Image (spheres, grey):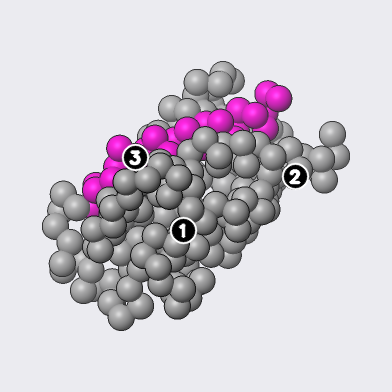
């Protein structure tokens, strides 16, 4: 399989996972938000998915493909710290707009800059990559991908809460959010987030490796 085919496979795998986990992710955003968003209509949990589909295809395609490419180059197919770091750096500029689009759709505010909170995206996603790929590649079975994703997601959830609240209000600073957020609030939405991201990456990486 050539590089282009691997990229297409990674993007396709991510879109399959997206359709399954998108409603859980939107539910997570609603819980974490300062604005107490409520959705009672199941179809509203798929609101905004159309622009996210191609972005997810490209973003996750780049992430998985980049990691796989440099992992094989640096460490002969074994876990590679450098490959996980590079994948995180490459995906950030695409991940952030996807996150912002989801938040825009939920709080009905189209004025949020697409790259607000990019530094928080890196702070969340690079450590996640190291944990996820580190555990996933240490065990050659499908279950390790889900376990790795659940563990990695749990560890970075406080950063995700901070990022959600920082992204939804362009007038607030990180210092103000930290001052206003209670300790237990940093794990608000942890169950839907662990389920959403956990299953998303578990499904995506398994499809990419074993399909």
How far, Cα to Cα, is label 1 from label 3?
A: 15 Å
Find residue 46 and name its label. Answer: none
Determine which residue is flagged by label 2. 7
> What SS does tag 2 mark?
helix
Q: Would you call the spot at circle 2 few (<14 residues within 10 Å), some (14-19), or many (20 or more)? A: many
Q: Is residue 40 above or below residue 147?
A: below
Comparing 39 with 197, the one in front is: 39
Q: Is residue 178 above or below residue 159?
A: below
Comparing 87 with 168, the one in front is: 168
Q: Which residues are magenta?
A: 186-211
Mark earlier in primary sequence (1, 2):
2
Q: Would you call the spot at circle 3 few (<14 residues within 10 Å), some (14-19), or many (20 or more)? A: some
Mark earlier in primary sequence (3, 2):
2
> What SS does tag 3 mark?
helix
Question: Could you tell me which residue is drawn at 28 percent across and 71 percent down?
Answer: 174
Question: Could you tell me which residue is drawn at 65 percent across and 29 percent down?
Answer: 207
Task: Tell us which disc is closer to us: 3 or 2.
Answer: 3
Question: Could you tell me which residue is drawn at 40 percent across and 68 percent down?
Answer: 108
Q: Decide if residue 144 is on the left or right side of residue 171.
A: right
Determine which residue is flagged by label 3. 192
Q: Residue furthest bottom?
A: 171
Q: Is residue 122 visible?
A: no
Residue 11 rendering spot, x and y as whole percentages? 68, 44
Q: Decide if residue 59 is on the left or right side of residue 36.
A: right
Q: Main secondary structure of the magenta part?
A: helix
Quarter assignment of residue 175? bottom left
Q: Would you call the spot at circle 1 few (<14 residues within 10 Å), some (14-19), or many (20 or more)? A: many
Question: Could you tell me which residue is drawn at 57 percent across and 47 percent down?
Answer: 84
Find residue 102 and name its label. Answer: 1
Q: Is residue 109 visible?
A: yes
Task: Please say whether residue 194 is one of the residues in the magenta stretch.
Answer: yes
């Amino acid at each position: 399989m050539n590089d282009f085919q691997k990229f297409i496979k990674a993007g396709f795998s991510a879109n399959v996972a997206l359709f399954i986990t998108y409603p859980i992710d939107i539910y997570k955003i609603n819980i974490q938000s300062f604005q107490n968003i409520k959705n009672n209509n199941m179809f509203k949990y798929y609101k905004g998915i159309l622009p996210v589909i191609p972005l997810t295809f490209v973003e996750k395609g780049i992430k998985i493909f980049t990691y796989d490419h440099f992992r094989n180059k640096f460490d002969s197919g074994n876990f590679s710290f450098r490959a996980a770091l590079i994948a995180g750096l490459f995906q950030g500029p695409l991940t952030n707009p996807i996150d912002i689009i989801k938040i825009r759709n939920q709080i009905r505010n189209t004025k949020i800059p697409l790259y607000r909170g990019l530094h928080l995206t890196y702070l969340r996603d690079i450590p996640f990559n190291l944990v996820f790929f580190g555990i996933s590649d240490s065990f050659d079975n499908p279950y390790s991908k889900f376990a790795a994703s659940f563990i990695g997601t749990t560890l970075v959830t406080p950063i995700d809460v901070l990022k959600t609240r920082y992204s939804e209000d362009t007038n607030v600073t990180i210092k103000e959010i930290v001052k206003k957020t209670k300790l237990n609030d940093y794990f608000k939405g942890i169950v839907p987030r662990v389920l959403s991201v956990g299953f998303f990456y578990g499904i995506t990486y398994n499809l990419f490796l074993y399909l």
